[in-house]
Amino acid sequence: MSTTVRRFLVGCFGVLLAIAVWQLASMIGPLAESPMPSAGEAITTMLQLLTTVDLWLSTLDTLVIAVVGLLAAIVVGVALGIAIGSSPLVMHATRVIVEFFKPIPPIVVLPIVVLVLGPTPFMGIFLVIIGCTIAIAIQTSAGVFDTDPVRKATGETFGLSRAEVLRRIVLPSALPYIGTAVRVAAPTSLIVAVVAGLLGGGPGLGQSLLQAQLAGNQPELFAYVLILGLLGLVFQGVSSLVERRVLHWHPQFRKENP
Amino acid sequence: MTTIQKPLRSRTRQARRQRAARSPRWLLIGAEVGLPVILIAAWWFASAGSTNIFFPPLQTILARLWQLTQTSEFLIDIGSSLGNLVASFVIACLLGVLLGLALGTSRFLSWLLEPVIHFFRAIPPVALVPIFVSLLGFENETRILSITVAALFPVLISTIDGVRANDETLDMVSRVYRLTWSERLFEVVLPAAAPRILSGMQVGLIAAFVVMIASEMLGSSTGLGAKTLLAQQTFTIADMWAGILLLGIFGYLATFLFELFRRRVLRWYIAAQQQERQL
């Protein structure tokens, strides 16, 4: 048996084991007294939910918020990054501001954003933009700054205009940085989209989750969390796939799949 | 190939150095300090006569913040929030590194548990808060547990990666020199994995901070997040802004302090990296 197959089988066994432990704990184990549903109940509810239209609609809402917000953040972040990375003066001038806002998560400004924009999809998109733009801008500016000056000078020697140098030399050499930043930002955008529903009352899976909790519907609550986990896995998979597609020419990726 | 690349590389370095020297130093430093000052001043003056209820004058917000910090209730809220954050983050780091060492060194364990761990990591940590609330109620344990779980997975996964990425030669050398099990762990494996572990902790710290606020916003009555949301719901806008400012500052400070810690622990690594870059 090859290592990959063995690894896959052991992994499957681990998943089954985890489900079994959950089932036992909730039936006869230490959690029998608590309102925790058994694994069987939660998974059945999840499968039932997956056949309802409502679930797919709220999933769509969450995905639209996350993806539109992420795309907007990429546009704004890359533009900012190019502006910051092109000149040492701008880089120094914005450093303190960027460094200050970088670690502050969007949940901090959620109260004021909800107040101004209301519990709308746009509120969610705005929060995603706030949450993802700075990280993308920082990476882009690092990439732009790291562009080989000799390459730029070579381009200029061959009579490329500034716009052409930007498009043909600076952006391609910053693209791996941008790719990494987007791959890291993708899960964040999903998290923020859920937070916008859960705490801001916006549409989507976060809101469904909150309603299940308020209704005291335990199996549904767990089912929603399971669905969010699956959605998160899909999101991660798709974003690294896209990164690999866009950057297939880069040496780092060529090395991985010869 | 290399004969061409070598002069090219030195040309690149030279060009970089020239670019750095182009703008005078005082201008760069002046811009670095100046722009934030200008922005804060702009906020102060632009909002000074503001009648928009959502955006009160900065002066009002700061005055309210000062007032609030004089009340013991507010200080208790801050203490509760920060106490939960620090306690949970420390627990998560210890647990994450311990579990990560176990999973990183045992191939069977990692094969067995990795799919489950990756599934848990894919769940937005904030989504776990309602589950803990429904199981444990609105007690403080709920918050500590939520924050710990949120910070645990980044630390755990980066520790597994760090331990596994260790150079095999290091392992062989330490075996040849007959280092004991604990010496190998503390003198070789952990230091070599430390850069990755610490960047995992950094990610975990931000997750912990987010979940700290979220766990307070979801139906708790103590804590800075709860007070900020309450102020929003009761339209005491200055209180809300005071909370937002303070949370922002704490978010920044948490990362800043951790970065100081990271630089202290990884002195040798950072120095080695710098030397490599200069070569």
Image: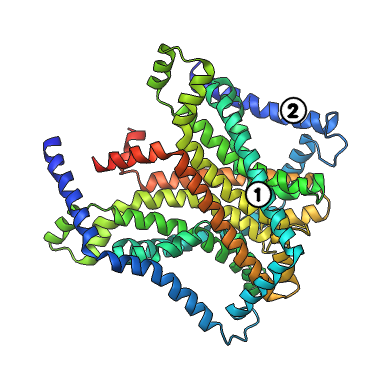
What secondary structure is marked by label 1? helix
- Which residue sits at x=53%, y=50%? B257
Mark closer to the observer (1, 2) = 1
Query: Taking B70 as reference, is A8 left or right?
Result: left
Question: Residue under circle 2?
Answer: A20
In contact (CB < 8 Å): disc 1 and disc 2:
no
Colouring scheme, one of rainbow, by chain, secondary structure, one colour:
rainbow
Locate the N terminus of chain B and report the quarter of the image it occupies: top left
Give the labeled residue for mark 1.
B85
Q: How many marks?
A: 2
Q: Is residue A1 above or below residue B17?
A: above
Q: Splitting the image into 4 quarters, where does residue A114 fall?
A: bottom right
Residue A158 visible from this viewpoint:
no
Graded by Cα atoms within 10 Å as few (under 14), some (14 to 19) or many (20 or more), the crowding at tag 2 reads some
Disc 2 is placed on an element classified as helix
Q: Is residue B2 left or right of residue B247?
A: left
Residue A82, image x and y in percent? 34, 62
The image's mark for residue B5 is none
Q: Nearer the viewer, residue A141 or A5?
A: A141
Amino acid of disc 2: Ala
